[in-house]
Image: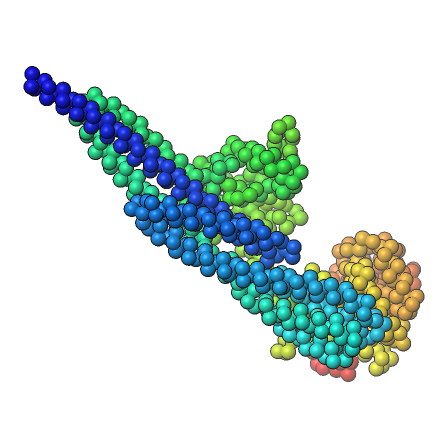
Amino acid sequence: MIATILRIALAVLAGIVGISILIYNDYLLRSYIETSSRLQSSIYRLTYEQSELKSELLKNSTFLYASYDSIHRFLNDMEMLASNLENRLRTHRTEYPQTLQEVKTFHDKLQQYEDRIYRFLDLNARMKSSLIYIPTLQLRSFTVFDLRSPDDRDVLLLLARISSTVFLIRNAHDSDFLKEIKSYHKRLQGAIAIYKDRKRALLQTVDEHLQLFAKSYPEYLQMLHTLTHPTIEQAIVRITTSFQKESKQALHTVTGTTQILLVLYLIALIIVIILVIRTYRENRELHTYQKKLERTIRIDPLTGLENRLAFDERFRHIRSPLLILCNIDRFKHINEFYGSAIGDEVLRSFARYLQDLEGLGGEKQLFRMGGDEFAILIDRKLLSSSVRTEDLVISVYESLDSVTINVEDLLIDLSVTIGASTEKERLLETADIALKHAKTSKRKHFALYTPAIDNRNEIANNIHILKIVNRAITEGNLLPYFQPIYALHTASVEKFEALARIETPDGELFFPAQFIQIANEAKLSGAITLTILRRTLESAQKDRNQYNVNIYAEDLLNDEDFDHIVELLHRYRDVTSRITFELLETEEIRDYEAISDAIAILKSQFDCQIAIDDFGSGYSNFESLLRLDLDMIKVDGSLIQRIDRDPQAELLVRSILEYAKGENIRTVAEFVHSESVFEKVCQMGFDYAQGFYVAKPAPQLETVGFFGNDQAK
């Protein structure tokens, strides 16, 4: 009886213990899941707010009218999130001591970060004020200064250069341009000393804003570099890493406790068995939650594909990777036209289309890298040896370039641009270079990375050349070199062509082939033309020679540039009849009527003559000539330099000569570089010859040497 009572008592006790253990275990698990979920959510929101904050800062550093309200809101949200996260961690400091310490450190850095942001916004506001005020003053200057006055025009040109330089330095983020600001300040001081009343007041105001800009810009640039440095992101990453580590440790503790309880469940008879089953189920829930937790970090929630973080981990384990980046063309237009909901569905549908893509061999891995950019990662060792990488890239492009997505009965046609790379050491970087190359290509919208398309050095060189051109224009180092144009019928020099050269203070000499294309892309052709024309007109006033000056079609079509040319010709009206303008890049002309009107002004008002340069190359044809009132044709050097040995070149040149003689247009042979070419040109009946065999260009007319004279070198 006593034994039975004891057994019953033990059974009851075992049941009570089992139930107590069950309740405690349930509380422990729920507490862990709830705490971990809330902390994970707070960290994720903190990451998101930081990303949005940096985006707003970049907008404010780029756009003049960006609002500060979003920045203040993101800072307040981050401050609140950090405080809430710190408070929650304090209640769980035994489980997450390191995470709590990292959050405290982050909180301190966030306060420093806020101070720097507000200092940056203050500097940005000052510079925006100057950026808006300087162009406003420039516009007002046209009502204050007289365009008919040479001094006033110089001041207006100086104000235009100040306005463009200020915008350029802020957008380029290059402090080297501050030297130009200082030179403009000196020139303004000189102008202020000359003018009085309204003119002086306007120039003083411009100078004040210019000095304010120059004073604020170095600190502004330093603050921008500081704010864009990933200090805060790294602190958040440390919080995330510490949380994951301590969360796993807490999970191990919970799991260990559960295992101990399982032994007790077995001792507690049926109650223990029930507890064991319950514990098993709860363990499965924990495992599922852990996977879900890892999945939220590595999986894109919109498409279900792995994200950039997962890509960074996976590609390192592939010895011979092939990465194909796929960018949906004009996806921004889809979002703007149909709305973000349709745009999201397009991204999901495109992701499913990628998953169904066949012919890639082996097991392809898909990633959404962000926005409308997807990635396909392939192990080339799993491909057949007969499959060429370039053929595979082309196959993927052809499969994706004509995809039609059906979204809510809307048929949306997609096209893609693809960049691919096999360079493991810089896989993503080189694939992105290939993608950008494909986007700028006019022939095909896919590219496989090769060193030949890596244009980073070219971009750096172009920026360097552009600085040299700007300084040459500003500091007077852009000079004309004069090359004789030899009249064959009189055996004498009748004209000189003014060729642009840049002489740097270091004694380095730059030829047009080194800088003219870069200058044209930067819209500086008008300034170059104006500088060379002015110096040539000055030379024409000193002698009785005739001069040829190069002019771009764009210079005639741009109203502002053409007005400056006309003003300059009016100043030197006494010598304009000895100027011939050589029209360049005629294949780019689209508005022949506007070009003809400009030519008519140059010929009727100033008695200038018009020539077409490089005729016979590219798109130049007789139809183009019929639309323009020409006085001279300069036959392209690519034909002339081989005319003594190439019958086809000779035939084409003879047809040009025949047409020119019929229209009473004089002809010039360019690139006459040898005696045999010179004799051939004479024999064919050209009016003029020009080239290194006749004479090389020289900065002064008296230093020009003829027919091999070393003075011309």
Task: Give residue 685's quadrant in the image.
Answer: bottom right
**Above or below, 706 relative to 351:** below
**Above or below, 562 relative to 97:** below
Task: Give residue 19's quadrant in the image.
Answer: top left
Q: Residue furthest left?
A: 2
Q: Nearer the viewer, residue 620 or 656?
A: 620
Q: Residue at x 66, y 47 (%)?
A: 443
Residue 622: x and y, percent? 85, 55
Residue 485: x and y, percent? 81, 73
Q: Residue at x 43, y 41 (%)?
A: 41
Q: Is residue 172 left or right of residue 492?
A: left
Q: Nearer the viewer, residue 683 or 270?
A: 270
Residue 137: x and y, percent? 74, 66
Q: Is residue 621 left or right of residue 472?
A: right
Q: Quadrant of the C terminus?
A: bottom right
Q: Quadrant of the N terminus?
A: top left
Figure coloring: rainbow
